[in-house]
Image (cartoon, rainbow, N blue to C red):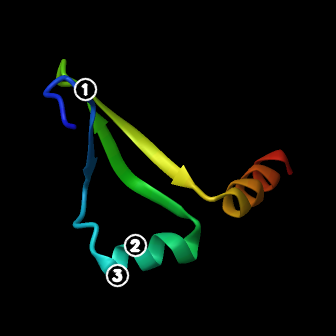
Amino acid sequence: MNNADDPKLIFQYEFDEYEQYEAKARGVLSYAQVLLKNGLLYPVTFYNTVRLGQDLEEKIK
């Protein structure tokens, strides 16, 4: 059920089958935003657990 006050997930590019494949292969999806009812946009990034672990290990080095 969608409510007008619910946050909306917005993709900067079309999220087609190819983009789904690429996101799964890379383990990360970084071109999405959440639109709140007050009009504010927040960037969001989705990681799978393997990619998140790899990125965190690199940041620690």
Q: Quadrant of residue 36?
A: top left
Mark 2, secondary structure of its residue: helix
- Quick one: quadrant of the N terminus? top left
Task: Using the numbered discs, state the Cα–Cα distance from disc 3 to disc 2 in whole angstroms.
Answer: 5 Å
Is 42 located above or below residue 46 in the figure? Answer: above
Residue at 27% over, 74% down:
16
Task: Using the numbered discs, state the Cα–Cα distance from disc 2 to disc 1 in whole angstroms.
Answer: 24 Å
Left-right relation of 49 to 2: right
Give the residue type at disc 1. Answer: Leu
Is 58 located above or below residue 41 in the figure? Answer: below
Left-right relation of 57 to 17: right
Mark 1, secondary structure of its residue: loop
Which tag, 1 or 3, sits closer to the chain's start?
Answer: 3
Residue at 17% over, 29% down:
3
Q: Crowdedness of circle 1 by 10 Å Cα count: few (<14), some, many (20+)?
A: some
Q: Position of residue 25 (x, y in %)?
A: 55, 77
Query: Which residue has dot 1 on it?
Result: 36
Residue 18 tag number: 3
Mark 3, secondary structure of its residue: helix
Give the residue type at disc 2. Answer: Gln
Is 10 located above or below residue 39 in the figure? Answer: below
Which tag, 2 or 1, sits closer to the chain's start?
Answer: 2
Residue 27 tag number: none
Left-right relation of 11 to 38: right
Q: Residue furthest left?
A: 4
Q: Residue furthest top?
A: 38
Give the residue type at disc 3. Answer: Tyr
Residue 20 tag number: 2
Q: Position of residue 10 (x, y in %)?
A: 25, 48
Q: Crowdedness of circle 2 by 10 Å Cα count: few (<14), some, many (20+)?
A: few
Is there CB contact under 8 Å for labels 3 and 2? Answer: yes
Q: Crowdedness of circle 3 by 10 Å Cα count: few (<14), some, many (20+)?
A: few
